[in-house]
Amino acid sequence: MRYVLAVVSEKNAGFEWTHEWPHLVISPEAAAEQVRDGDLVGTSLPEPTAFLYALAERSDLNDVAVFVPAPRKGGAAVGTNPKLELRAPFLTQILREAGAEAELIPVRLEDWGRFAIRNPPRVACVQVGTPLPDGTVPPGSAIAGNDSLVRRARREGDLVFGLVNPVVPYIHGDSFRVEDFDALIHVPLRGSMPIFDERTPPSNLDPFIGALDELIPNGATVQSGVGGLTEVALARLTHKTDLGIHTEVMCQGLMDLMKSGAATNRLKTVFPDKTVFTIALPETFDFLNDNPDCHIVPAHVALNHQQISANRDMRCVNGALEIDLWGQVNSEMINGVQHSGVGGALDFLRGCQMSESAMSIHLMPATAKGGTASRIVPQIGVNAVTATRYDVDVVVTEFGIARLQDASVRQKAERLIGVAHPDHQDELKEAAQRMGIC
């Protein structure tokens, strides 16, 4: 990622923030030393890894809880320290590989900021970009709920640290000020870790692309889930015209739509002429750097249900792990074990429900485990329901489109069976009869 460092450094040509504000410079270890017994520690997305590593090295703490929105290596280090309790709304592969313990906090991304206000940490640490000569501190690659960690009303003794990542881009939109922080952590970072686990899309994309082509009109505003099928399929709609982007995460697929000219934001009704997001992935950094067509905003803005619903012909495209014949979606758990988290998918789904012209779309392959297991199942466990049968609008597999909105329970089951893999349709029909649905 050397190209990112070179581009960002041009923004601050000849300026060194550590010389301008030497009284604010602090090491990760010195910041972590400020944590006391009984503290609640709040951190950002992306995680401030160096600070978390330093905190995880402490063995003298008791009754300390650390909130890390999407834990990476620093969060995993905290989760393997028996003296610390890791809390997270989104679990990651890195946690599982490290054998780290984490308490799941079921909270929507749109609510992360208010969560920090309801549960104020005494010590907060957020990752930020390089401060500018005028005292502006860019949020870096994400703001999400970080604004509330920084700007909330503080109690006596509360501390807010910014960990400066020199390789993140300068993104137009919301930002902080130097005076918002008690200290700024200086570390020689080389790059930024990806925020979410990578996923591999299915090899046969044509049916999904065809379905999205039918469901997404020219001039629509789109949102995409991260990685895998949803992102890759959306990126193929380069023949569309005047699409807009209002999303949670700025990812490779949406960037490709902008580069192709398919997404111009020209017809957008919310943040007109701007691509809006609250998180940016590393592969988009070069494109986003000082790009006036792209705008980063807090999660409570990007994922606000009314803002979403006010967009022109909103189309929210997200993945799912499985869906049952009642029309309930599971996006978080595998075999009864928490795998990830809800992220912003539920916020966009609910925003779509508030608009007559909007549509939420769940994309998923019909099968898993090499075709031996159907992703359309008779009934998912009650604790695995991410979106209820009252929420789910459209489901797409490689076998077709199932429109569930306003459908009866019987119709939902019949339409879902119709887009299941043919090898599993008979057993699903029998299950539906046993449950009294069909």
Image: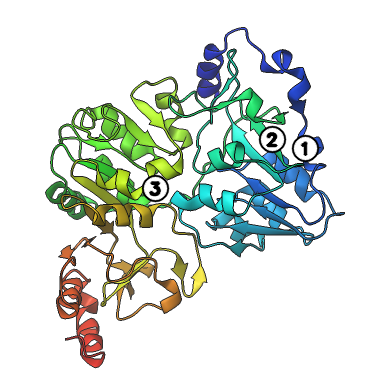
Residue 426, numbered label:
none
Q: Position of residue 147 (x, y in %)?
A: 54, 38
**Residue named by callout 3:** 226
Q: Residue at x 62, y 41 (%)?
A: 153
Q: The residue under label 1 is which amino acid type?
A: Ala
Query: Which is in the foreground here, disc 2 or disc 3?
Result: 2
**Residue named by callout 2:** 161
Q: Position of residue 243 (x, y in %)?
A: 20, 35
Q: The residue under label 2 is which amino acid type?
A: Phe
Q: Residue at x 35, y 35 (%)?
A: 276
Identify the secondary structure beneath mark 2.
strand
Q: Residue at x 18, y 65 (%)?
A: 405
Q: Position of residue 84 (x, y in %)?
A: 75, 58
Q: Is residue 382 above or below residue 71?
A: below
Which residue, as the protein is rendered here, is positioned at the far top?
Answer: 14
Q: Is residue 267 left or right of residue 294?
A: left
Q: Quadrant of residue 173?
A: top left
Identify the secondary structure beneath mark 3.
loop
Measured Cα–Cα span from mark 1 to mark 2: 7 Å
Q: Is residue 28 above or below residue 305?
A: above
Query: Which is in the foreground here, disc 1 or disc 3?
Result: 1
Identify the secondary structure beneath mark 1.
helix
The answer to the question of whether label 1 and label 2 lie on touching residues, with beta carbons closer than 8 A, is yes
Crowd band around label 1 with a 10 angstrom C-alpha radius: few (<14), some (14–19), many (20+): many
**Residue named by callout 1:** 31
